[in-house]
Image (spheres, rainbow, N blue to C red):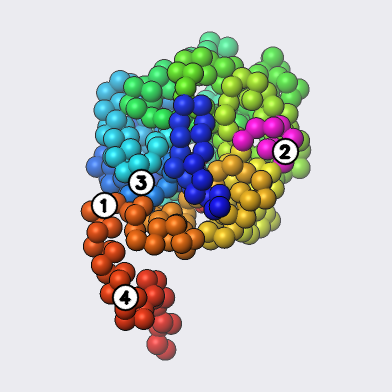
Amino acid sequence: MVKLFEKVVFRGVELNNRIVVSPMGMYSAENGYVTPFHLVHYGKFAMGGAGLVFVEQTSVTRKGRITNGDPGLWEDGQIEGMRQIVHVIKAHGSKAAIQINHGGRKSSQQRAFRGNGPLTDRDIEMGEERWTPTGPSDVSFSDGFQAPIPLSKEGLVGVRDAFVATARRAVLAGFDIVELHMAHGYLLQSFLSPLANFRTDEYGGSLENRMRFPLEVTKAVRAAIPSAMPLFVRISATDWIDGGWEIEDSVIFSRKLKELGVDLVDCSTGGNLRAGSTNANLTRGPGYQVPFAERVRREAGIATGAVGMIRTPDFAEKILQDERADLIFMARQMLFNPFWALHAAEYFGLTANFENWPEQYGWWLTKWGGALRANGESLHGADKYPEAAE
Ligand SMILES: Cc1cc2nc3c(=O)[nH]c(=O)nc-3n(C[C@H](O)[C@H](O)[C@H](O)COP(=O)(O)O)c2cc1C
C-alpha cells in the first residue's frame, strides 16, 4: 500500500492523498484582493492532483500585510475572489486550505521578487505604500528594517479579533481547512521567540508568557469555526539561533495546541532574526526539517506536516512509512512541476490509464500513452533533455 496516496481524515474533511501544496506568497494581489492570476495559479495545483492546496499567507488586517502584494480577508469584499479560488480547487477533487497571518515586525517590506528587504525610496516611487509595523516589542527584525510599535493590550485584542473575523470569512469562502501562521518571524511567532519578544507584561518573559498570545488566538479561532473544520498551525520548530526558540519549546507548545483542538502542526523552521545574527550556516539538504516534524509528532502526540526540500516520490513515501509525519507539504517542487502528484501516482503504478487525471486530459493521454508504449518510448522520455551542446 502506498501511503502517500492513502486517504486521510481530519475532523469532517477527507483528503484524497497526503500531498499538500504548501502555502506560497505570490505578492500579486491588488490592494489585498486576489486576481485572475491566483485563480489560474491555484487551479493548476488542484488539476495536478494534490490532496490539499493551500492558498498563501493571507492577511488579517491591512497593516498586517508583509508586502503591498499580499491578499487579505480583512473585509467582506475580499471573500468573493477567494470563493472562486475555492470553487476551482474543489472542482478538481482537491480540498482547499488557507493560511492566515499577521506580518508583525516583518510587515511593510518589499515583495520577495523585488528584493525581499526593507522598502526603498525606489519602491515608493513605483507606488508601494510604506507603514509602520507593529510587534511584541520595539526591536526591528534586522538591520534596515523599521522598528515596530509594540502592541498594547487593546491592540492584542484587536489582532485576536481580526484573526477570528478572517477565519469566519474563510469559512464563508468555502475553505475546508484554516491554518494559523505561527512561523517565519511574523507576528505570532515573534511573540513566541525570545529573539523578538522583550515584553515585561504577562505576554513576555517566561515561555508560558510568550505562548500566551498565540494560544489566545488559537482558542478564539477554534471557537469561531465549525467543529467539523480542521485547524492547522504552522510553526518554526527552531529559530536556528542560540538563545532563540528551540525544538523543546515547540514540543511543549504543540501539546498546548493539541489541548486547544488543533489538528496538525506544520513544522517549518527559521525566518526570525536578532539584529546582527544570521542563520546562513544552516544547510538546507533533502528533508532537513523532517526531524522536527518527527519529534513533535512523537513527543506531543499530534499529527504533523513535514516540509522542506522534499522532492521525490520515494522520499515522500519513506517519511510517511517511517511515521515521521502525516502529510507532505511541498512548495518549490510544485512550482517546478504542478503535476507532481499525478506523476507520483503514475510512478507508483496507481494510475496506469490516467484515471486520476482531469477527465478532459485523461481520455487523450490514454491513447497517447498506448501509442508511446507501442513505439517502445517511455512516458517521461521527452522530459529528459540532452545536455546542451557546447
Ligand atoms: C514563493 C514562495 C512563497 C512562500 N510563501 C509562504 C507563505 O505564504 N507562508 C508560509 O508559511 N511559507 C511560505 N513559503 C515557504 C514554503 O511554504 C515552504 O515551507 C518552503 O519553501 C520549503 O519547502 P520547499 O523546499 O518544498 O520549497 C514560501 C515559499 C516560496 C518558495
CA gap, disc 3 and disc 1: 13 Å
Q: Nearer the viewer, mark 3 or mark 4?
A: 4
Mark 4: give few (<14), some (14-19) or many (20+) Cα within 10 Å.
some
CA gap, disc 2 and disc 3: 31 Å
Residue ID for mark 4:
372
Which residue corresponds to the image point at 34% horizontal and 27% vertical from the top-left? 174
Mark 2: give few (<14), some (14-19) or many (20+) Cα within 10 Å.
some
Disc 3 vs disc 1: Cβ atoms closer than 8 Å? Answer: no
CA gap, disc 1 and disc 2: 40 Å
> Which is nearer the eye, 135 or 145?
135
Residue 367's disc number: none
> Which is nearer the eye, 11 or 23?
11
The amino acid sitting under disc 1 is Glu
Which residue corresponds to the image point at 39% horizontal and 75% vertical from the top-left? 378
Mark 3: give few (<14), some (14-19) or many (20+) Cα within 10 Å.
many
User: Is residue 279 among the parts visible in the rendering?
Assistant: no
Residue ID for mark 3:
46
In this picture, is 303 found above or below 92? above
Badge 1 marks a residue whose secondary structure is helix
Q: Quadrant of residue 199?
A: top right
The amino acid sitting under disc 4 is Leu
The amino acid sitting under disc 3 is Ala
Disc 1 vs disc 2: Cβ atoms closer than 8 Å? Answer: no
Residue ID for mark 2:
298
Q: Decide which of tag 2 and tag 4 comes sooner along the chain.
A: 2
Residue ID for mark 1:
359
